[in-house]
Image: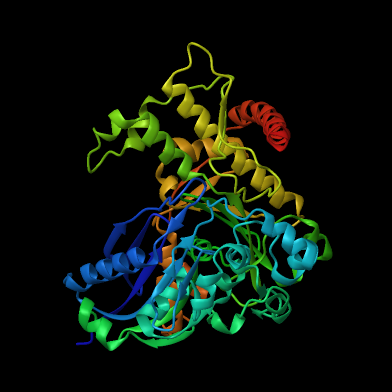
Amino acid sequence: MRKTAAYIGLDVGSSGCKAAVLDRDGNILIEKRREYGFEYPSKGRVELNPVTVWSCVKEVLTDIAQEKCDCEIRMIAVSSIGEAMVMVDENDKVLYNGIMYLDERGPETVRQVDEAVGVDEMHRITGLPPRMFYSLNRILWMQKNEPQILEKTAHYFLFEDYITYMLSGKRLVSQSTASKTWMMDVKKLEWSEKIGKIFRVPLERFSKIVQIGTIAGNIRTELAKEIGLSETVQVIVGCHDQCAATLGSGCVAGGDVAAGEGSTESLNLVVNREKLTDDFWNLDVCLEPYIVPGTYMVPVGQHTHGTSLRWFANQFAKDLKGMQTPTKSVYDMLNEICAPDAGEVFFLPYLTRANLMDGANRSLGVFLGMEVGTTREILYRALLEGVSFETRLCLDILKSSNLPVERMVAAGGCSKSELLMQMKADVLGCDVAILKNADAGISALAMICAVADGVYSSYEEAAEQFIGITRKYCMREKLHDVYSVKYEKYKIIRETMKKLYAQI
């Protein structure tokens, strides 16, 4: 009797990697993970070591292979963080750590691009507004500061196609991940020869851009033997992690919004190609090719969303961290002691100068309005309100675009917090549905495999089987009115701090 078909979804994030085996109905059969962390070689520099990441990937896949499972693992697909590059020499030796989105080096590169091409023209070519953390900016910085590394580089990868390459030996990158470089033509879905020529970037050293779901080939024989997987497992081209989170939230139609509630927060709006009018290009937002052909994703968000919560726990809740149990995290305990009202205390969640939505905003994080009676519990409440107000700012941008916003589905680690999700519903003024499977990206990768395997004819059909809603947080009108008043104050504080930091 033939075993049930199953698929591995492998998500490579900024703080760890996780892999899960799902069957054709979307049930998680096995799940494993490993944690790693950023490296901080000097002030303002934030890096991720590709060697460490690959080692952890092999460990989670080995763990999965050792588990007894009455299924046939047929395919594996990878999602990952965007922008950060992996540079290797002709022997595939890693030459440099990935420069992360939180890294502050090279703000002058945006001006360099503007002078050479014009940021408006770059936006129309690549779909990306000017930001300092794209791959192109890192290359421009290295041309000036680390030219010897670029001279040795035989191949450029992003983390998605680096892991795909290490699994299969094929250099293929998805359209969604390639778009995060600031070097891909978002309409033609290919590398921009114009950008490569102007900035002296050898685009032929990057992976070939292909459609999500493309079959790269079988897992490398020697790797299969090392980690214990079958040599018949096929490697499928995955996608950018936010793209995966959006599909895994069941968002397949124009107007669907997925809220990725992780270390970063991304509100990802699915848009049909015909809805992209000339007015869209006046917005300071990104356009990313989506999984369903003919659609794009418009992501808006904040870099230090879950990062703000983790920072607070590390700095102000060390006593609670020591009391954690397998069933109760430090965040659960913080939620239990959280003050019912933050009063006039505000928090700006800008724990990096790399501002996702406003490249001109150089503000840093701040608690404002503290007095002698301000407690840890009040500060935590203010922090949750601050990240929620930033979410509302992002949603307001989407609404101002005249693009349809029909419904919101949240997934990711922070979506497990009942306190934060109810606050989001009240602040935003809309209901927030929570996925049954919080790891939406993992589900999406299995869906991509299942469609590539011919089990489902479309992503719409796969979503009907894979996606389930476990809870819905309904907006409470009275609280929404209260938060709306405070939100107006928050916007004034935000603009004031922006002007202040522009002067110092």
- Specify the farthest residue to the right: 278
Q: Nearer the viewer, residue 147 or 21?
A: 147
| Residue 419: x %, y % from top left | 44, 35
In the figure, 205 relative to 137: above or below? below
| Residue 312: x %, y % from top left | 42, 34
Left-right relation of 408 to 248: right
Q: Residue at x 27, y 88 (%)?
A: 221
Left-right relation of 181 to 88: right
> Splitting the image into 4 quarters, where does residue 321 fall?
top left
Quarter of the image for the C terminus: give it: top right
In the figure, 334 relative to 397: above or below? above
Left-right relation of 397 to 458: right
Quarter of the image for the N terminus: give it: bottom left
- Specify the farthest residue to the top: 372
| Residue 216: x %, y % from top left | 44, 86
| Residue 13: x %, y % from top left | 42, 60
Q: Nearer the viewer, residue 262 or 315?
A: 315
The answer, for residue 425, to whether it is visible in the render is: no
Q: Residue at x 41, y 77 (%)?
A: 164
Q: Nearer the viewer, residue 105 or 346?
A: 105
Left-right relation of 231 to 488: left
The answer, for residue 261, to whether it is visible in the render is: yes
In the figure, 416 relative to 241: above or below? above
